[in-house]
Image (cartoon, rainbow, N blue to C red):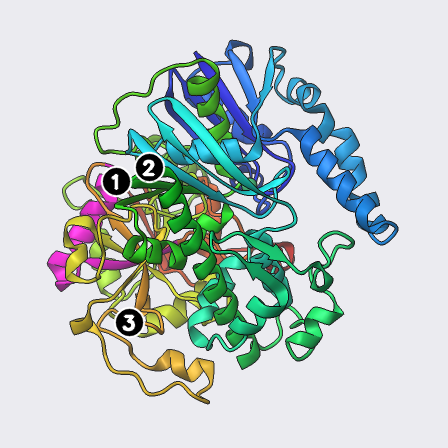
Amino acid sequence: MHILGISCFYHDSAACLIQDGTIRAAAQEERFTRKKHDPRFPKNAVAYCLREGGIEAQDLDYVVFYDKPFMTFERLLLSYLTVAPKGVRSWIEAMPLWLGQKLNIPKVIQMETGYEGEVLYTEHHEAHAASAFYPSPFDEAAILTIDGVGEWATASYGFGKGKEMTLLKELHFPDSLGLLYSAFTYFTGFRVNSGEYKLMGLAPYGVPRYKDLILSELIDMKRDGSIRLNLSYFNFLGGLRMTNRRFARLFGGPRRKPETEITEREMDIASSIQAVTEEAVLRMVRHVHGETGQENLCLAGGVALNCVVNGRIVREGPFENLWIQPAAGDAGGAMGAALSVWHRYLGNDRVDPEGKDVQAGSYLGPSFSNEAIKTYLEGKGYPYHLLGADQRAEAIARQIADGKIVGYMAGRMEFGPRALGARSILGDPRKEETQTVMNLKIKYRESFRPFAPSVLEERASAYFDAEGPSPYMLLVANVREERRFPQPSGDGMPMLERLRVKRSNIPAVTHLDYSARLQTVNKRDKPDYHAVISQFEKLTGCAVIVNTSFNVRGEPIICTPEDAYRCFMRTEMDVLVLEDCMLFKEEQPAWKEKGDWRSELELD
Ligand SMILES: [Fe+2]
């Protein structure tokens, strides 16, 4: 039985293939088209999934779309009518896509893939909820999904048991925590639907001086964590901008222009909205615990990517265990929709998870064999060194220990926004300059942005106050007390100067507040990466390395050896590893390219 799940036409399109209940393949379209958050029909991702599954479109038993387009259409229509004629411009811009592709999903699927069978639909939050529960390690769990916008529901909760899933309640548009966070992302000059992560990264630099203002003026937060927005400050209904002049007056002036200097105001705003979000989510979590009486919690939806909130749920929440779908945003909807068909529509039981999730480390994308890589490198005349199995990990670890920045591509590509050691750039966390060098010379992005550590799962507690594993880099934990260095008071100190103060003995991955966005690496899911970190520990005594996604700013994470080589040559990366092949920058022929490649990338 082959079921294909598809999510598209909002942002971050994706496809996922389930074969006899097993997650066989999943990938985001952006990785193939090289257009970040590509919302178009995931033609390439579908083709990849079919290839990986060894089937043709005609062999599919079901295709399922993760959203009911008619319900979303109705919401748009009603909200535009509410504010008419104010929303006419964005209405006109949205309509061609709605009337054309979104309302004709079966036709689009048939045209793009050749599949002529039945097309099913799940509701948006049903897809998110299914993506959180069915792959989780729990036989029974509460489910919470918190999102920007999808259909009418912006958050929902319920519970799952075996193959059954029951959604109890929904919060409706426009009262959305995700949308509120996005409004602040917009106001602080970052890109909505991708800059939320930056806002979270900026929060520790500020103080939450606007928190009370947000709570008293902008929203009404209930005991159960649900919120009502004061719509007189927002512009989601009527226009293309998210906040209005009244909003700007409340925060002492207009929105920060993108790419201009980040001031204390933006840091304080970031800190404030993060604090409000944490409070709302923790209230929701407590409420869901009370309503469901479950011990385990599954999370999905865009807000579940806020790993600072997640860290607090683990530390403070009433739940014993937490599992988060790594592709928590809309891409994961493709997986949830397909799993929903298998378990809910067709009534198939779940296999006993025996305490392990079935996401397989989220390594669900394409891989490339050594043969394919050698053929590519030799065809292009790019010099490389073939590493034998016995020296591979050590050779790579030695480069990192020597302070080199290493591009690392091995095994199947990750599904979801985080790079987990299959498409990663690696560095030495003990060196203070790693953060600045990686930000400015490799990623070409703001130097305040912190990096994440990959640590051997079995050694995590020696470095971090971590409660349990964090294989998907979705939890924040603090660096252990004895590894920290005291900090000067931050008042009035410019951001760049504060960055230069050494915070711990793994400074490149320690955030201002001593927190770190952790990935624990286990041998079962990622043996090659585990071996590299183990060797690094043998050489240096440190079981942690810096892991950042293999891309430059504004570019999707690399997928193929070609993408990897291009990124390697465009940046000041020193070494490139493609499976067992190692390349040194100084041995490569000069890189020539027409025009300025940076102008092709969208700022995020
Ligand atoms: Fe969503």
- Please report whichever mark, 2 or 1, sits nearer to the chain's N-terminal start: 2
Q: CA distance from mark 3 to mark 1?
A: 25 Å
The residue segment tinted magenta is 525-548
Ligand 1 placement by image quarter = top right
Q: Which residue is mark 3?
A: 507
Mark 2 = which residue?
A: 411
Q: Is residue 308 left or right of residue 430?
A: right
- On the rendered image, what quadrant is the N terminus found in? top left
Residue at figure coordinates x 56%, y 78% from the top left: 265
Query: Extreme bottom residue here?
Result: 492
Nearer to us of marks 3 and 2 is 3
**Is disc 1 surrounded by few (<14), some (14 to 19) or many (20+) residues within 10 Å?**
some
Q: Residues within 10 Å of mark 2 (few under 14, many from 20)?
A: many
Observer-nearest residue: 32 or 251? 251
Q: CA distance from mark 2 to mark 1?
A: 9 Å
Which numbered marker is on residue 245?
none
What amino acid does circle 3 point to? Pro
Foreground residue among 101 and 171: 171
Q: Amino acid at mark 2?
A: Gly
Residue picked out by circle 1: 526
| Label 2 SS | loop
Vertical arrangement, residue 592 with respect to residue 270, above or below: above
> In whole angstroms, how far apart are the C-alphas of marks 3 and 2?
29 Å
Residue at mark 3: C-beta within 8 A of ligand 1:
no
- Residue 476 lies left or right of residue 544; in this view the side is right
